[in-house]
Image (tube, rainbow, N blue to C red):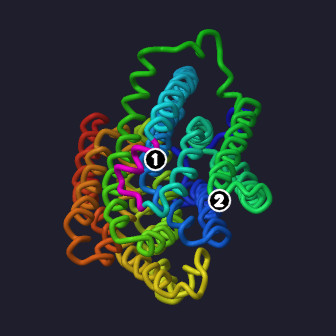
């Protein structure tokens, strides 16, 4: 069972292996964004523009907190992938057990802290008064769901680190459909307003996480704990924190720039907030294939560095870049052809000004999507190779770029600066990540005794 439920990415041609892992990852992330978008779509259509702006105004702070959770769990999965590549099953199980202990502690502390500070955070972000209550009602419930976020992302990350990207997709598909149904039920039947959308998301993710956990315990013989392997270990926790916390901080530091940008957008009024909210949700959806590509690179890199296959790592990096560039060109074509109508997913056709501003945002981002390609491929590959601290510096580059656009450029040129804030952040990160990748490969060459160029 251990060798049929998992996928070894250290043997065989890289392209089929990468595509075989990537496609379920892609569909999983698309469905995850779909049920995140469902909140915004249903709120915008059923509750109006102010409710849409209120929910959308929380996206940056949500990304900062929830992104930290996701980054930590992604980091915890890296030692699992590396030990799987080494074929060290005992150490693999110890990392799995200790990641569970750490995730439980992190989720408890974070839930209490951010729920207590939730209202103050929205005040600090200069959330407009007419949408403030909508924002608070929604994000407070999302923060209550932090334990569910940890559960799903940790378990699905462990499963993917063993080469199985299909199972998390199946459970996520089920919960995505459930989320949409719960959205309509909570908003239209129970009349819970924007809080209902938050509860729908929380319950859907919790159910998905529980199903993944039950499946993992039943199907993965390699994860069956032996005597003493489940006990907390300071050494294993230190390694996990050394991987997970930098990855979580990378998301949060990146999100600080997004919070500053969101604050600048809030100052432009509710119409700009609504357009930014709709556009940002759509860009997150369009970015899913690149996020999935990055997650694939992390697992692929983790397994192959464990097997000391630097040649396969180089080839995987080239394949990932080519796939990403092709996709970025297709995305731009779609926005050029259909950018005028995509915003109708969230807005009514009568809201012409908001629709035009949404189109501008989509165009500004997809014009520089190739910058996001290298952020995804190189950053996640570096993390998978065990150099997750470098990801923090890439996140710092993104933070400074978005902060500059929010603090300096938005007051000067207005909404157009918002449209190009993320592209500026991607370019800034790439300027760091390219030499960082070359440094990592040279370091590994010395460690493994190889001399091939990166």
Out of 257 and 142, give the one closest to the viewer.
142
Q: Residues within 10 Å of mark 2 (few under 14, many from 20)?
A: many
Give the residue drawn at x 35%, y 38%.
246
Q: Position of residue 112 (x, y in %)?
A: 50, 31
What secondary structure is the stretch in magenta mostly built from? helix
Which x, y percent locates residue 88? 53, 25
- What is the number of the mark on residue 67? 1
Residue at point 26%, 46% (across, down): 393
> In the image, is residue 283 part of the stretch drawn in magenta?
no
Q: Quadrant of the N terminus?
A: top right
Q: Is residue 1 left or right of residue 159?
A: right
Tell me residue 269's x, y (percent). 39, 71
Circle 2 is placed at which residue position?
A: 35
| Position of residue 91 measured from the top left corner of the image (x, y, whole percent) | 52, 22
Q: Helix or strand or loop: what does disc 1 sit on?
A: helix
* Residue interval drawn in magenta: 118-128
Instruction: Mark 1: give few (<14), some (14-19) or many (20+) Cα within 10 Å.
Output: many
Q: How many marks?
A: 2
Of the pair 390 and 48, the residue shown nearer to us: 48
Q: Residue at the front extreme?
A: 129
Task: Tell me the element at label 2.
Answer: helix
The answer to whether residue 307 shows anywhere in this view is no
Residue 124 is inside the magenta segment: yes
- Compare marks 1 and 2 and give the one earlier in the sequence: 2
Using the image, determine if residue 264 lies above or below residue 386.
below
Relative height, residue 303 to residue 232 (above, below): below
Q: Residue at x 66, y 28 (%)?
A: 222
């Amino acid at each position: 069972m251990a060798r049929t439920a998992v996928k070894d990415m250290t043997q065989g041609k890289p392209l089929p292996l990468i595509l075989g892992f990537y496609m379920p990852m892609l569909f999983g992330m698309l469905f995850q964004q779909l049920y995140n978008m469902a909140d915004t779509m249903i709120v915008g259509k059923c509750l109006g523009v102010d409710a849409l702006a209120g929910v959308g105004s929380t996206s940056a702070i949500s990304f900062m907190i929830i992104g930290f959770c996701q980054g930590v769990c992604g980091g915890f999965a890296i030692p699992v992938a590396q030990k799987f590549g080494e074929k060290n099953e005992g150490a693999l199980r110890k990392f799995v057990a200790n990641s569970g202990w750490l995730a439980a502690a992190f989720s408890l502390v974070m839930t209490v802290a951010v729920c207590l500070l939730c209202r103050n955070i929205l005040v600090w972000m200069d959330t407009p008064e007419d949408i403030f209550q909508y924002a608070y009602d929604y994000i407070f419930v999302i923060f209550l769901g932090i334990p569910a976020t940890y559960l799903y992302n940790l378990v699905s990350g462990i499963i993917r680190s063993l080469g199985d990207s299909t199972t998390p997709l199946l459970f996520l598909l089920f919960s995505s459909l459930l989320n949409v149904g719960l959205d309509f039920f909570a908003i239209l039947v129970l009349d819970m307003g924007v809080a209902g959308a938050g509860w729908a998301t929380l319950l859907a993710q919790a159910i998905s996480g529980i199903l993944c956990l039950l499946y993992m315990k039943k199907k993965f013989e390699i994860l069956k704990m032996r005597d003493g392997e489940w006990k907390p270990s300071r050494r294993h926790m230190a390694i996990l924190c050394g991987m997970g916390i930098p990855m979580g901080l990378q998301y949060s530091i990146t999100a600080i720039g997004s919070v500053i940008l969101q604050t600048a957008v809030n100052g432009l009024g509710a119409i700009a907030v609504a357009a930014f909210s709709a556009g940002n949700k759509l860009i997150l959806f369009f970015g899913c294939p690149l996020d999935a590509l990055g997650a694939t690179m992390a697992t692929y890199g983790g397994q192959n560095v464990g097997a000391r296959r630097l040649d396969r790592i180089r080839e995987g990096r080239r394949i990932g870049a080519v796939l990403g560039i092709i996709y970025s060109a297709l995305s731009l074509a779609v926005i050029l052809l259909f950018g005028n109508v995509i915003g109708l997913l969230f807005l009514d056709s009568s809201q012409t000004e908001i629709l035009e501003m949404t189109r501008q945002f989509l165009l500004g981002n997809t014009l520089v999507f190739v910058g996001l390609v290298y952020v995804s491929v190189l950053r996640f590959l570096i993390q998978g190779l065990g150099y997750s601290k470098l990801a923090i510096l890439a996140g710092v580059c993104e933070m400074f770029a978005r902060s500059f656009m929010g603090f300096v450029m938005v007051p000067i040129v207005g909404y157009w600066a918002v449209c190009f804030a993320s592209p500026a952040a991607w370019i800034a990160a790439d300027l760091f990540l390219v030499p960082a990748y070359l440094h990592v490969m040279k370091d590994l060459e010395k460690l493994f005794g190889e001399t091939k160029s990166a």
